[in-house]
Image (cartoon, rainbow, N blue to C red):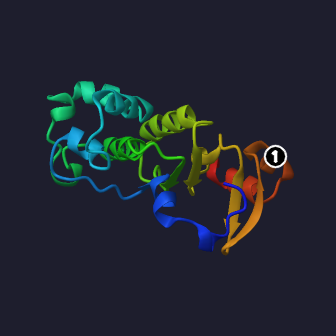
Amino acid sequence: YGDIRHEDLNIATLRSKVAYVSQETTLIDGTLLYNLTITNPEASKAKVKDACSKAQINEMINELPDGLDTEIGENGIKLSGGQRQRVALGRALMTDPEILILDEATSQLDSETEQFIQEAIKGLHKKMTIILVAHRLSTVRFADTVYVLEKGRIAEHGSYAELLEKKGRLYELDVLQHR
């Protein structure tokens, strides 16, 4: 996009290229398919299948009584927290974002479900820019670049391995989390 001043950005165009998944997933009472396509109601079956594959929810869909046509209840009450997060990721991918923001998207998940999300993210690597906001270091271990923030400022940045070698703040946090 070059050197475009923020005042000159077309906000609608920018927003159309960004998808956001928060730690608090909001789903609508209706079918799984409805929840996946709410951001893209005209999506083809192939598009839905592709997003489900990227979000690693095909196995989950196959286990549901009516597959994509399963009613998931108000705010996805019939799904586990991890399933809801993966549906939110699938819904975000339905918009073909160039930038995907995951804001603490794995913070409330068990380790197995976090692994599903991490595998989904790894599959999207190099296909789009992914911004992960996380306190759990396992979530960012495979990131190209890690920015460690303290008191609203960048304390250090680099690859996870580089930051461990520096024995700075990330190293200290890593030691604390692995005790």
Q: Residue at 33%, 27% (x, y): give it.
A: 46
Taking the view exactly as shown, the residue that stands out farthest to the right is: 166
Choose between 109 and 157: the one closer to the eye: 157
Judge whether 83 appears above or below 50 on screen. below
Q: Residue at 66%, 74% (x, y): give it.
A: 152
Q: Position of residue 149 (x, y in %)?
A: 68, 65
Judge whether 23 appears above or below 165 on screen. below
Choose between 129 and 118: the one closer to the eye: 129
Q: Give neighbour class at mark 1: few <14, some 14-19, many 20+ (Cα, 10 Å).
A: some
Q: Position of residue 13 (x, y in %)?
A: 49, 58
Q: Secondary structure at mark 1?
A: helix
Q: Position of residue 70 (x, y in %)?
A: 16, 36
Q: How many marks?
A: 1
Q: Residue at 50%, 66% (x, y): give it.
A: 11
Q: Which residue is mark 1?
A: 162
Q: Amino acid at mark 1?
A: Glu
Task: Give the quarter of the figure containing the N terminus.
Answer: bottom right
Q: Is residue 179 left or right of residue 100?
A: right
Choose between 8 and 162: the one closer to the eye: 8
Determine which quarter of the picture holds residue 2. bottom right
Q: Residue at 83%, 53% (x, y): give it.
A: 167
Q: Position of residue 148 (x, y in %)?
A: 70, 60
